[in-house]
Amino acid sequence: MDESVCIICNKADDKQVYAIKKAALNRLVVSSKKRIDNKYKKFETLTSAFIHRSCQSQYNDETAIATFCSSSQKKAKEGKEVIKDALGFNFESHCFICGGFFGNISKEKISCVQSNDTRDNILQYIKKQNTINDFDKKISARLQNVPDLVAVKVHYHTASMANFYNKRTERKRGRSACENTKIFFNYLIDYIVDNETECQFSVNEIKEGFSGDLPDYTTIKNKLKEHFQNDIEYHLIKRDMIILYNNGTASKKLCKDWYEKRLKSKEDERTRIVEMAAEIVLEDIRSKVYDMNYYETLDIDEGNLFKDVPKTLQVFLNVLQTWLGNELTATDWGWKQFQRGIMLKFTQKELIPEIFFKTICCSCETGCNSLKCGCRKHGLKCTNLCSNCHGSENCSNIEEETYEEVNDSEEIVEEEPTQSGNNVGEEEGDSHEDFEDLLESEMFDESNDEEMPSKRQKLMDK
C-alpha cells in the first residue's frame, strides 16, 4: 500500500496526510457502518493507515453522516423508480423518450424505430454529457432493458426526439456553428433511419420538429454524403432539398429472406413472391422525384411515353397486359359470337335484385303508420308494388296529389294557319300522290321483284 494515499479520498498528498493506528481505524469502521458504504470491510483488515485530517473529521461527523444517509436513501428511491419504470414500460403505446401515451388520436407525429443504431446513438450521447439528470437516467434505463428496439416495435414522438437533442443547447449560450451542425445532423440521421421505408424526405418537413438554427444545404449535403456514401441522392427544388435514401431495403430483404424464409405451402410461397415483387416496385416508385410547383408542356410520343415509369413497374404491367389482353379471345372477354359478327353478351343476373324490392316495397298490414314500415324507414312513399297496402288511400305513407288551380277567365287560344282555297287543293293533291308513292315503295321492300314505276313516272315517260 502506498503510504502517501488517503484511505478515504484515495488522493496522494505527503504534506497533508498522517498515520493513524487501530483505535482511529475502529472509529472509521463505526462511521462506515452508519453510512452503509461497505468501506468498513477494508478498514477492519488494516492495522495502520494514512488519512487527511479533513477527511477524517468529515467522515466521522454525525451531521455529515445523517446528510449522506438521507442523500443515499433518496438516490436509492430514485433508482428503484427508474428501474420500475424501465421494467414495466410499454414501448408500443408510450413514447420511450417523454413517456407520453399515444392515444387513439394523436396530434403529434409518431415514428417507429427501424434500426438498433438509434439505441446506441442515444446511449452514447447520454454517456458523453457532463451532467446526467433524471430524464436521461429514465431514457437510459429503458433502452438498456431492451437490447432489440426493432423487435419490440418501439415508437416515439418526433418532437420529443428533437427536444432530446435540443435541450442540451439551453445550458450554453452562443453555440458554435460546428456544434449546431452536429446536433442537427444527429437528429437528421435518426429521422432518416427510423423512417427508411418512406425512401423520400423533405428537409423542410424534417426541420419542423427541430428548434434552432439550421446549417445550409451544402453542409447538409456534404455531411450526408460522408455518412451514407452512395445510398443518398439530393435534389434541390426551389427552397427545399429532397433526399432520396436508397439503402436497398427491398434488395437486402430479398437476398436475406429469399432462401431463409421459404414456405412449405405452394400457395403461401406464391403469395410471398408477389409481396416481394410489390415491395421492389414500390421502392422504385418512391425513388422518383417530381417537381409539383410547375408542370412541363406535354410532348409525348412512342419513345418517351413511359419515361417516368420505373422499369420494374413497366415489366410488371407488360406481363399483366400480355396475360390478360393478347392471349384472350373476344368470347373470353365476354362477347357473343353471331353469324355476321360479335356483340356484347347480356347479363344473366336479375335486372332488379330481390333485396332492392324489399327496400322499396313494404309488407305492412297496419296502414304503414310506424317506422317498422320499410318504405317509411328508407324515406320512400308506398306504391302499388307494396305487397299489402298497394299505395292505396288506406295507407298513410302515400304521396299526396297536388292540383294546379286554373282561372275560368283564362282562355287557351289555338292559332291555326289560314290557307287559301288554291293552296289547299294543291296540298291535297300532292299529299295524295306522295301517299301512293310511299305505298308502292313499301310493297317493293316486302317483295323481291323488280322495281315498279309509279304513276307520276309513267306520265312523265309519255
Image (cartoon, grey):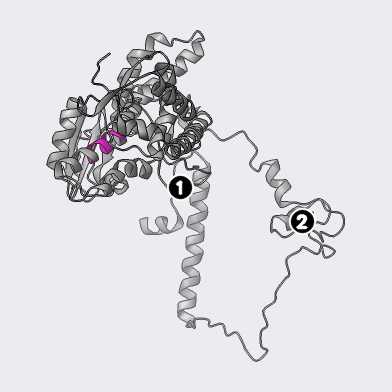
In which quarter of the view is residue 383 placed? bottom right
In which quarter of the view is residue 220 placed? top left
Question: Looking at the picture, which amino acid does disc 1 mark?
Answer: Met
Residue at 40%, 9% in the rendered image: 260
Q: Which residues are magenta?
A: 184-190
Q: Quadrant of the C terminus?
A: bottom left
Determine whether the residue tagged by mark 2 lies in a helix, strand or loop.
loop
Question: Looking at the picture, which amino acid does disc 2 mark?
Answer: Asn
For mark 1, what is the residue?
Answer: 452
Up the image or down, 398 lies above or below 162; here it is: below
Taking the image as shown, residue 276 lies to the left or right of residue 130, namely right
Percent of width and height locating residue 313? 31, 27
Label annotation for residue 384:
2
Taking the image as shown, residue 353 lies to the left or right of residue 218, namely right
Up the image or down, 36 lies above or below 297; here it is: above
Q: Main secondary structure of the magenta part?
A: helix
Residue at 38%, 37% in the rendered image: 136
Percent of width and height locating residue 312? 29, 24
The reply to whether residue 341 is in sight is: yes
Taking the image as shown, residue 308 lies to the left or right of residue 46, namely left
- Residue 187 on the magenta span: yes
Q: Which of 298 and 437 lies nearest the eye of the viewer?
A: 298
Label annotation for residue 39:
none
Determine whether the residue tagged by mark 1 lies in a helix, strand or loop.
loop
- Residue 403 on the magenta span: no
Up the image or down, 261 lies above or below 325; here it is: above
